[in-house]
Amino acid sequence: MIWINLGVALLNLSLLLGLVTILFPRAGAWARIATLAAIKLGGVVLVTALLVHLATEALLSTRPTFGPPTGGLVPAIPGPHISDFQLSAGELLATVTSAAARSLLLLLVAIVWGVLVGLGAAYFVQLRRSRGVLLSVMAVLAWVTPTFLLAAFAQEVQAQIFNFTDLRISGGYGSVSAWQAVWAGVVIGIRPAAYAYRQARVTLESEAAADHVRTALANGLPWRAVVSRHIMRPAAASLVSAWLNSFRIMLGSLPIVEFFFGYPGLGQQLVLALGVSYPNQPGAFQPDLVIAFVVCLALIVLTCEAFAELARQRLDIRLADLNAVTT
Amino acid sequence: MVIGISEPTQWSTGVYAGGFVHGTNREELAPFPVMANLDVFDMNAHLVGHHIYILGSDPGGRDLLALIARGSLPSLLLVALVVVTRAFVGTVAGAMIGLGSGLVRTLSRDIGDWMIGFPYLALAILLIDVLTPNGRVFAFVVAMSLIGWRDVAEVVAERIQYVRTQPFAMGATALGTGRLRFFQLHVIPHLRPAFVVEVVLQCSAVLVLLAELGYLQVYIGPVINLQNGNSIPLLVQPELGQLLANSRMYLLYRELAPFLVPALAIAVLALGFELTGTALKGKWRFAKR
């Protein structure tokens, strides 16, 4: 019931903010963005609560079917049971915030390196006026490789480094350490970096074919200046969109990577709360935790979306020109 | 795939404890390594026959090549069903965004934006749990379609909006062409290339999603357990996602083949779709010039 109340409260808040934007049109972009974020978050809370309720009923009504037990074969471990363990609101909040803090550390590493590699490589290729075939091939390969395969590769690299040098650089399975954050962060960032690179290349290429770029070149401007002033600046708003999408991909693969490395962040906790378990362990479906983790992840996405929207409005030179004319 | 499917079904359905290296008395216990040439025996130590495991075996002694070849068919069928559903929902939503009135356009776009606020794996698992009583395949198709239609909708809407701003489209509207006729005559020819490319790229996205769900032990079909010191779930009907369900255990015991072979098979299939999409994109871009 607490989740329904929270969802309705968020929808009421969005109504209030909506009224503010109507009554005070000069309240700024933040009010419109906050209104939309409150509507979305309220919707996420309500829909997740509904889905979790339905999933609980479905899990209670169905049990997996098994093949005949012959020889050494026995029926598989039963599906997840519904946990009736109730956390108080305070415990729930503490669990979610500590897991969120750990995940934000991973995401920070992934964002920094994903942005640096993905967008940086696209800028570099544009600057060199090359087609970037090798980087494009690498991006395609990274994109089609499932995240857990990349994680397994990272684990193998750790093992080989240990075999050859006796250096322990894994950070310890299931622990929270700097090495663990770096490895998991790097793995989380690979596919989003590939996505960001591909999107940025398309955006920069189409911007480079624009008339104003040809004019700038005809005026004798050096290519480096053309790229930074006449290609990157108009493309900045689209690049922010590409980054936002790659961030969503990053957040999508968070459960897989954290589950793989046993890193106790939001993703792993969410997967465990959904009833997925490690080998030979029975899973437990924990309804309240599922909703709390989903809402927390949605909150992270919506916060990033809000900042990205503000950044887009600042960076879009067409919108900036329009604002300059109207004010 | 042809080699795998042409192998007798016993090598992908039976359970085998081990085998003697062909022509010697050296014993190997399942899982067998890559290119193992063995005289295989079953759980009751009865010799079953001679077999070459080209890609190795799973812990039940079943040929991975045969499992992957047979598992690819239901997986690709599932991918096709999901992509068709995504394409249908995405086209309808995209057409509403591109052709609809202001309210319909805003609503459709906002619903799409709102959907991506959810962590997609959690949403897929929850939907699969909710819909499983109506059939596992149905649950997978609906869950995997609901989280991916927005990309198709974006492509369709973008193309429609592009066409609507062209002089010929304005001329057609001025001449009183109806929306359906306008869509048929002017939008579809411009939409087709981008749509086909997007659909092909969606295939690789769905395959990777299927693999990720499989890794998290969410898969179609029942399993049986092999008690061999540790409990090892084996598949009754192979499917690519399902083949990855025991990945963590294989990695723990350093049995790389049963983990790597299905994972690489999915990556190769996804790469095939991706390259097809890229080639089509390049071909149409070249033709446009």
Image: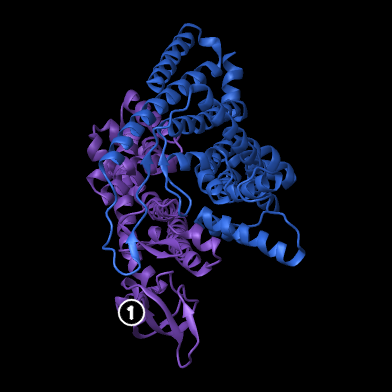
Chain colours: A blue, B purple
Badge 1 density bin: few <14, some 14–19, many ≥20, Cα 10 Å: some
Q: Is residue A159 above or below residue A321?
A: below
Which quadrant, please, contains the C terminus of chain A?
Answer: top right
Residue closest to the far top: A23
Q: Percent position (x, y) of residue A116?
A: 68, 45
Q: Percent position (x, y) of residue B190?
A: 36, 47
Residue drawn at x 50%, y 10% as measured from the top left: A25
Q: Nearer the viewer, residue A1 or A34?
A: A1
Which quadrant, please, contains the N terminus of chain A?
Answer: top left
Label 1 sits on a secondary structure element that is: loop
Q: Is residue A29 above or below residue B112?
A: above
Q: Percent position (x, y) of residue A203?
A: 56, 44
Q: Which residue is mark 1?
A: B7
Q: Nearer the viewer, residue B82 or A42?
A: A42
Q: Is residue A293 above or below residue A21?
A: below
Amino acid type of the residue tagged 1 in the rendering: Glu
User: Position of A180 compared to B72: left or right?
Assistant: right
Q: Is residue A120 visible?
A: no
Q: What is the chain identity of the residue bearing mark 1? A: B
Q: Is residue A293 above or below residue A32?
A: below
Residue closest to the far bottom: B23
Q: Nearer the viewer, residue B181 or B214?
A: B214
Q: Nearer the viewer, residue A59 or A100?
A: A59
Q: Percent position (x, y) of residue A261?
A: 58, 50
Q: Is residue B266 visible?
A: yes
Q: Which picture quadrant has residue A71?
A: bottom left
Residue drawn at x 56%, y 25% as measured from the top left: A319
Total numbered labels placed on residues in the image: 1
Residue drawn at x 57%, y 55% as measured from the top left: A151
